[in-house]
Image (cartoon, rainbow, N blue to C red):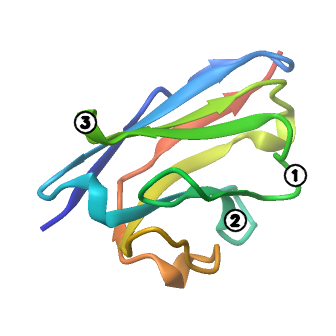
Amino acid sequence: QLQLVESGGGLVQPGGSLRLSCAVSGDSLDYYAIGWFRSAPGKEREGVSQISSSSRITNYGDSVRGRFTISRDNAKNTVYLQMNSLKPEDAAVYYCAAVRIRFLVPIMRPPSYNYWGQGTQVTVSS
């Protein structure tokens, strides 16, 4: 059973940065595409970014493109989300998710992914 654990969330001022980590266990990360999603009160879960197993394909949501960067270290079984120039509207619970697919990525929507972490809270406030 694949397990995902997010970390790195917290409180940051607008314009600040955070780096989220997603530690994966139970199988080799080599076989999985990984996505980051976020949920804010009153909003649907939103796709933030995703990365293919080989890192050759990365996708970003329109609201974060140019500010967030996804990366992965398969040797460490960890995926990262570097978040820069944070805005109050970025505040949410951030989840990482996995789907077993090599070299490709699915449509960046929650139903495309079948393994989920418990989430980490990101608060952007002065």
- CA gap between label 1 and label 3 equals 30 Å
Residue for badge 3: 75
Q: Which residue occupies 68% across, 37% down? A: 69
The spot of residue 72 in percent (x, y) is 44, 40
Q: In the structure shown, which secondary structural element does the residue marked by tag 2 occupy?
A: strand
In the picture, the quarter occupied by the N terminus is bottom left
The crowding category of the residue bearing disc 3, from other C-alpha atoms within 10 Å (few below 14, some 14 to 19, many at least 20), is: few
The spot of residue 31 in percent (x, y) is 29, 65
Residue for badge 2: 46
Residue for badge 1: 63
Q: Is residue 82 visible?
A: yes
Query: At label 1, which amino acid type do we have?
Result: Ser
Give the answer, above or below, for where 53 lies relative to 1: above
Q: Which residue occupies 56% across, 24% down? A: 10
Q: Which residue occupies 36% across, 77% down? A: 114
Image depth: mark 3 or mark 2 in front: 3
- CA gap between label 3 and label 2 equals 28 Å
Q: How many marks?
A: 3
- CA gap between label 2 and label 1 equals 10 Å
| Direction from residue 34 to residue 38 in the image, left or right | right
Q: Quadrant of residue 79?
A: top left
The spot of residue 80 in percent (x, y) is 49, 36
